[in-house]
Image (tube, helix red, strand yellow):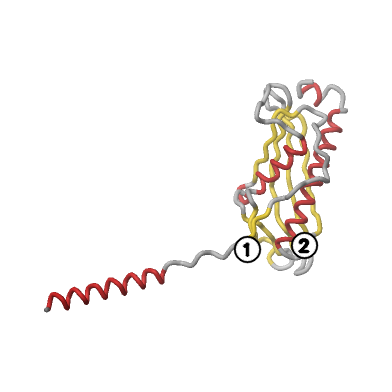
Amino acid sequence: MVRKLLSRTLMAAICAFALGACGSVPRAAPGYSVHDFGPLGAAPARPPALPIRNTEVVSAPWLASTSMHYRLMYAQPTRRQVFVESRWAAQPGQLLELAVKRTLKANDSTPTASGCRLRVELDEFAQVFASERESSGVIEARVFLLAPRSDQLVASRSFSLARPAPSANAAGGVAALREDVEQFNRELLGWLDVLATEGAGPRGRCGT
């Protein structure tokens, strides 16, 4: 009889512990929206004026995630924050690299010895709020054109773009940054076009 009583007490304790453990399991995180740039049609896709062997985008460490960043310049200008319910489909640098390659029609699957290497260092990719209702998508990047064999610097340029967001939320930031990417591609193509006209300098060093 005593054994049966002890057994029932032990089973009750186990059940109580199990229920308590189940109650301590954290709830699943709420769903969040995932964004990319969608179709980019503002910048015409065409081969660049200079031969490009390879294109890569290297992100700053603080951009090495799918988080969607924003900054409140009017309240906490030094604080980098992220939207809880919105994410990028990939890291911003990866999305930008794909967009650039599509615009330049770069074929990196079969790299050759000819052509320069295009390296983009992405320093900023965020929505910046000037006030509670006004914000812009901001992209800061440095582009380096490197010689095909030695990787010596052929030319470089800094890019700084800011487009007003249509709404003061994550969706507005996505729209503004998408326009930034299109503008970046246009300016990048234009820059390469100018370099191609500079005599035998960049054109000769890129293998043409």
Number of numbered discs on residues: 2
Q: Element at badge 2?
A: strand
- Residue 195 in the image, given as x and y percentages of width and height: 84, 31
Q: Quadrant of residue 204?
A: top right
Q: Which residue is mark 1?
A: 85
**Is 105 above or below relative to 71?**
above
Q: Is residue 97 above or below residue 1?
A: above
Residue 34: image location, x then y, percent: 64, 56
Which residue occupies 73% across, 25% down?
Answer: 115
- Whether pointer 2 and pointer 1 mark residues with C-beta atoms closer than 8 Å, the reply is no
Relative depth, front residue between 66 and 135: 66
Q: Amino acid at mark 2?
A: Ser
Please state which amino acid type lies under the numbered disc 1: Glu
Estimate how packed mark 2 is, as few (under 14), some (14 to 19) or many (20 or more) residues with alpha carbons within 10 Å.
Answer: many
Taking 204 as reference, is 57 left or right? left
Q: Which residue is mark 2?
A: 135
The C terminus - image quarter: top right
Q: Is residue 127 visible?
A: yes
